Image: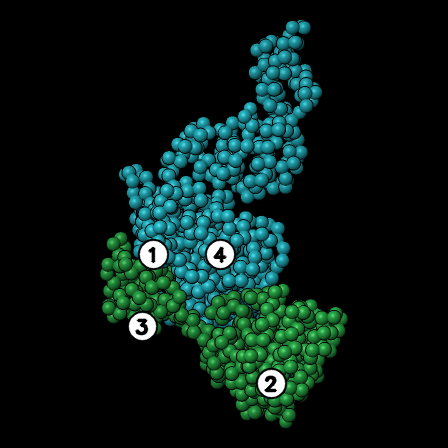
Chain colours: A cyan, B green
Amino acid sequence: MATLDLASIGLKVGFEIHQQLATKTKLFCECSCSETDKYGYAFTRKLRPTQSELGIYDPAAVFEFKKMRTTKYYSAPGSSCLVEADEEPPHEVSKEALESALVFSLALRSRIVDEVHVMRKIVIDGSNTSGFQRTMLVANGGFVEIADKQGIKRVGVQTICLEEDAAKLISDGETAREYGLDRLGVPLVEIALEPISGTPEEMVQVALTLGRLLRASKRVARGLGSIRQDVNVSIQNGPVVEIKGVQQLDQLAKVIEHEAKRQHGLIMIADRIKAAGVSLEQIGDRLEDITNVFSQSDSSMVKKILSDKGAIFKAIRIRGFAGIIGFEPYLGIRLGKELGELVRFYGLGGVFHSDELPGYGIDEKQVKDVRDRLQASSRDAFVIVGGRQEIVEYAIQAIIQRLKAAMAGVPAETRAATSDGRTVFSRPRPGAARMYPETDIPTIPVSESMLEPLYGLVPKSWEQEINLLAAKYGLNRKLAEQVFDSDYLALFEEICSSQKADSKIQPTFVASKLTEDIVSLRRQKLDVSSLTEDMIREIFERLARGVITKESVPLVFEKLMKKEVGSVNDAISALGISVLTDAELDKALDKVIRDNMPAIKQKGMGSIGMLMGRSMAALKGRADGNRVNAMLKEKLEKLLASS
Amino acid sequence: MPESNGGYRGASYELLSAKGISVGDSIIIRTSDSEVAGLLMPRYESAGADHIVIKLKSGYNAGYEVSKIREIIKVPAQEGHQYQKLSNPIVASQVKDTLPQLALISTGGTIASKVDYRTGGVRAALTASELYSSVPELARYASIEPEMLLNEYSENLGPEQWTLIADKIAEKVRSGKYSGVLVSHGTDTMHYTASALSFALQNLPVPVVLVGAQRSSDRPSSDAALNLLGATIFAASSGLTGVFVSMHAGTSDDVIACHTGTRVRKNHTSRRDAFESIDASPVALIRGDSIEVQNPHPTGQIAVKNKAAYSVTGENFTARTRFDKRVALMKFYPGFDPSIISWAVSAGYRGIILEGTGLGHVSRACFPSLQAAINSGVLVCMTSQCIWGRVRMTVYDTGRDLLDMGVIPLSDMIPETAVVKAMWALANTKDLKEAKDIMQSNIAGEISRSIPI
């Protein structure tokens, strides 16, 4: 298997950052932007592509439509109204949101359009009740400055758009999808950068710098899901693959690297197809229903598929493809895998192909039967797909199309980032723009008098913000950077400012818990989202009241992130870490002293360090170190004096 | 009127005409600080004159201020986006001729439309083939023959247009070719037209179903397709005759309600389920393929017919399609100025429908004007602004006084239905007594015998 030299393959990456704005209202109504998990009234809809739309997507949109999948929407009072239900025309564009987009445009020296036009971008997966996302171009051009080894480098801005966020996917079943309306309509700023080349690390720097600039404005939402990066990756001037849903920056470099490798692998596969001398017509030139070949199969996978009523198996002949579908130029990069991801889009579990058969309980005899049916020679490959007949028919067309595309290397498509840094197929890339004007909202002229008051709101540089933050809270630079870049800046400031004058809780302590401790727990693959901001507030409030000790804070974080308990209270009682009373501490320390009498006799007061360590271990954070030390010292002095 | 070009006027119009540029052209604009390329888009008439609109390659439209434009040039057209056609569109000729035949008369409001993504324009899908490719499921239920009669927002449809529509329907019915007639209509005044047709076309041998959309049909979320589908299924196979309105029953895309033409009202500005039957349940609910008849017509005018008898001209079918628009609908409110009534009389109005308070009242201050109107031969009738419920003018003194004056109580007739009915009654008789009788007799379900609890 080859190793990949990223520098040699003409890797180009374009970023699109989608940043939620911290506005009081949604973009097109007066509802609150706060998300919820408690929903009320629900209703169902069926979207259908508008007429000319039917032709654009093939076969994906038509398939989605044919399935006539029902979408169920859950509303949440306060955060959704008739506008989100698509039962009332949109209100005027939120002035606050538009101002934010204009401020960012000024900060990036982007050319603001003279008149903003709201557009409808067709999206029929159900994530928008209207069937389109409302979006508006605010500015184009400009640049962001990145510090790199050679000094300052400029990365061009393509466009700055203001748009509405989509509804929140709650569940995705075979016949119905469920969405929450609370997130629909939350304002997002989308900033698309020019594609750049460089190492994945440099590209991460670009995303980081842009994210910091947005945060410095204090006009953006923080927290999980408030910023999403789409990454457009191409190599060797090939087609662009759009990767959606990169949530964490530390995942970004991995995703880019994986995608570059995948694309390079696909080019190597294409070379092999060319070498085999296959022509387009030879791909999928013969289809056979092989349900009866498989009907007696012992394969559990086959049996499972056939247990579905009306399920069939079909085989596709691909001439000259022997060895190509299973060819793995890089670890995990195979056409076979691409096909598996593709059919999953149609709700099928996967495919079987000749390079991996016999296998999966399909025996030599069945493989031979399939070959005979297809009249396939040993140089030919075949792909088998099973499921409900109408789905299989769609999937076959998609498979043939995908294999034909493999001859050219990389197909343009939309992929999703996985949590382990790979990318998987999500849908064919929409061809031309599917946009038309939102006629319900008048156009908005942007005059110089409208921009005038906004110049003063252009964010300070990240450097300046860090210095201010460090000075204000007495943080060291590293900690100030970490807090600023984390999702918890606002929470940090809130917790610090809520402390009483005599509080023992220092900003440095709060900052390190909110950054280093949470990051380290996240690295252990624990779920940050189950530790809510409300929980964190409660934990620090308990700490301030002396209910728990500083040492217990990360333990409570961990307990909650492991989802072993659902509340701070439960975490504290499960851990048994509520602070000991004086009497309890007295008893616990007496036991430590009893257990260590020989050492005390030997070392006298010199044993206090050792006793302190043993005590803290035994107390598991249920008493503050200073308190333990004082009591222990007193006991020891008394003991030694009496002996 | 200034000359215009795709809605451009003033400075933008002058710039474009000087350069010989028209809507749809590929252009490049240079300003002091930027250069943009794209297609020139039309401009809404209501928008200002100082900007020109370009569709950029990304698909976004943006406006550029004329005064900032240094240079604008027309460039050869870029190759347009190629849109793949649906692999096997349904063409009208393929629709089975054994299916019921329906006529679809469009009056405006695009029940089916296409978006041109090049210009962003929306245009109505007018031919049968376009209709089927827009709503392919239609072809399972009926063979539909569309005809465009009018193309108006419904607020522009009035008594003259009711006559036109009614005559057209009568022509279709009399041809004997159709099992039903669908009328696509803007929603704002659809219930007025439905009432008008209910009175104008009596003893219909086939159903006439009005259908509209609260969300325009160029949107993926439009209610148009399901409303049209519901109307089609109902018209093709319910076996009921009369005039109906077919719209969403709730906010979900699942159930379509078919309402009696005289009992329906638009009760919400924007919701899909804006149309409701007043003082009655809908005639039928259409859920998927199935028609659940809720409320066979209270007057018994609608007969469940033998399907085989379709496409036969009804023997008793009558079309009296004229309306006299000299009827005023007056809503009483505290502070209502009775001289409005006197003005209407002097302006030659032949009828006044009062939308009174509660059980059917107006203030004492109105009495002299009302008495004068009645004395001069104006038909004065009472409905209630409560919308739901019946007027009952014998309960309070005010009501009794109004009755004594000669105000005619209209039971639970919806005010909008009442005004249409009065226009129809007065066009069909010169005799006031006869007009009063018409107003008080139940002709098309406009008066309920009993209101369900």
Q: Looking at numbered disc 2 in the image, what kind of residue is underneath it? A: Leu
The chain containing the residue under callout 2 comes to: B
The chain containing the residue under callout 4 comes to: A
- Between disc 4 and disc 3, the foreground one is 3
Neighbourhood count class around disc 3 (C-alpha, 10 Å): few under 14, some 14–19, many 20 upward = few
The chain containing the residue under callout 3 comes to: B
For marks 4 and 2, give the CA distance: 48 Å
Marks 3 and 1: in contact by CB < 8 Å?
no
Q: Which mark is residue A114?
A: 1
Which residue does the numbered mark 2 point to in the structure image?
Answer: B426
Which residue does the numbered mark 4 point to in the structure image?
Answer: A28
Q: Looking at numbered disc 4 in the image, what kind of residue is underneath it? A: Phe
Do the residues at discs 3 and 2 belong to one chain? yes
Do the residues at discs 2 and 1 belong to one chain? no
Q: Secondary structure at mark 3?
A: loop
Q: Residue at x 54, y 41 (%)?
A: A528
Which residue does the numbered mark 3 point to in the structure image?
Answer: B3
The chain containing the residue under callout 1 comes to: A
Q: Residue at x 63, y 58 (%)?
A: A41
